């Protein structure tokens, strides 16, 4: 415990020395979220992280999440130093959408407006007309559909199908999934609901269709946190990374939050529902990121790619404003 206190004190000192703030995702460890909150940083979804990072006066952003979140910060704020606790924190959606193959897919469908999820590399964003996060995906596709545009969507097929069903838009979808949300199991969730008949089911739309169909609320992380507050039920079964429980519990101390099952028969799987790459972030790696030679931790992006990727990202922020 003493060691932890010392690490936290060192991190706080380094944040001041480097004029840095922590920009953390909801899926990070609760002690990281607490640290971000108490040092003037933010805890948010990827859209709000991008907004915060581009607006905050700090000259260094310590982005605690996965690589695409650090890259997004760099694309929007090239003048800032962007550091991450580790540059190895990937995302299965990003990995599942390599630039060469994706670019060929776009070339094969030149008539379609290319919309990519924020969970992609800078190079893939640079190839897109729009970037989008799950919190505004339905609104944006609705808008593009109203303009008569056909959509090429990448990379998450579950989210793409969900958005297609909600909007009726013509969407051609890349085939990739999030390894965390793709694991939520329908049968086990049905059984769990029998054990907790009063519970509300909250589901992130990166989950499989059959799981989404069992939901009382479907939404992005920030939308699910809001739902945890306004839903009457005292118990919530939640299908997304369980890092989100920190914010839900903070907002509703009297409610009970259970992870939706990811494996086994009806089990509440407490060790699952956790992104392995998000989990690479810890107090130790944050301290290293702030103190070690920056080349190991600094996000760098080719300037030509950055400028191209800036355009669809800026469009997203203007649309969301
Ligand atoms: O699953 C993710 O990585 C999410 C939900 C990112 C986000 O948009 O906050
Ligand atoms: Fe990617 Fe899924 Fe991890 Fe989010 S939870 S960073 S979508 S692998």
Image (cartoon, rainbow, N blue to C red):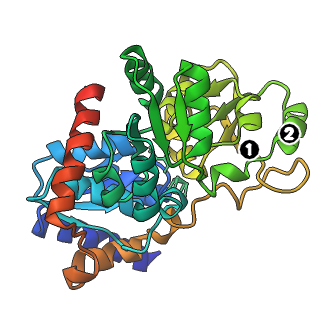
The reply to whether dot 2 and dot 1 touch (C-beta < 8 Å) is yes
Q: Quadrant of residue 63?
A: bottom left
- Image mark for residue 192: 2
Q: Secondary structure at mark 2?
A: helix
Residue at 52%, 56% in the rendered image = 93
Q: Nearer the viewer, residue 214 or 159?
A: 159
Who's the residue at 51% across and 66% down the image?
Answer: 277
Give x and y (percent) for residue 146. Answer: 40, 14
Q: Is residue 21 visible?
A: no
Left or right of 302 on screen, residue 37? right
What is the quadrant of residue 144 in the picture? top left
Residue at the spot 20% in from the left edge and 51% down from the top edge: 308
Question: Visible in this render: residue 295?
Answer: yes
Q: Position of residue 33 (x, y in %)?
A: 41, 53
Report crowding for label 1: few under 14, some 14 to 19, many 20 or more residues within 10 A (C-alpha): many
Q: Earlier in the sequence, mark 2 or mark 1?
A: 2
Which quadrant would residue 301 be assigned to in this image?
Answer: bottom left
| Residue 265 on image: x %, y % | 91, 51
Tell me the SS state at disc 1.
loop
Depth check: give the residue in front, 181 or 35.
Answer: 181
**Which residue is label 1 attached to?**
260
Q: Nearer the viewer, residue 105 or 159?
A: 105
Location of residue 284 with respect to 313 vertically, above or below: below
């Amino acid at each position: 415990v003493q060691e932890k206190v010392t690490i936290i004190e060192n991190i706080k000192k380094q944040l001041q020395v480097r004029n840095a703030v922590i920009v953390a995702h909801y899926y990070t460890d609760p002690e990281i979220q607490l640290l971000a909150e108490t040092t003037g940083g933010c805890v948010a979804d990827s859209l709000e992280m991008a907004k915060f990072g581009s607006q905050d006066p700090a000259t260094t952003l310590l982005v605690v999440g996965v690589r695409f979140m650090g890259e997004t910060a760099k694309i929007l704020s090239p003048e800032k130093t962007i550091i991450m606790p580790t540059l190895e924190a990937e995302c299965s959606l990003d990995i599942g959408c390599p630039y060469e193959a994706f670019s060929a897919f776009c070339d094969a469908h030149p008539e379609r407006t290319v919309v990519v999820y924020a969970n992609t590399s800078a190079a893939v964003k640079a190839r897109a007309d729009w970037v989008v996060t799950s919190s505004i995906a339905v609104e944006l596709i609705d808008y593009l559909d109203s303009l008569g545009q056909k959509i090429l969507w990448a990379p998450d097929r579950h989210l793409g199908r969900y958005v297609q069903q909600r909007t009726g838009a013509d969407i051609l979808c890349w085939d990739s999934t999030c390894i965390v949300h793709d694991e939520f199991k329908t049968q086990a969730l049905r059984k769990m609901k029998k054990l907790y008949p009063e519970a509300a089911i909250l589901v992130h739309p990166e989950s499989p269709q059959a799981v989404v169909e069992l939901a009382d609320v479907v939404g992005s992380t920030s939308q699910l946190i809001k739902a945890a507050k306004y839903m009457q039920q005292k118990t919530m079964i939640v299908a997304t990374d369980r890092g989100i429980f920190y914010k839900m519990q903070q907002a509703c101390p009297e409610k009970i939050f259970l992870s939706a099952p990811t494996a086994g028969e009806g089990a509440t799987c407490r060790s699952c529902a956790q992104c392995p790459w998000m989990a690479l972030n810890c107090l130790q790696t944050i301290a290293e990121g702030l103190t070690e030679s920056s080349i190991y931790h600094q996000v760098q992006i080719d300037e030509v790619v950055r400028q191209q990727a800036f355009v669809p990202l800026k469009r997203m922020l203007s649309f969301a404003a």
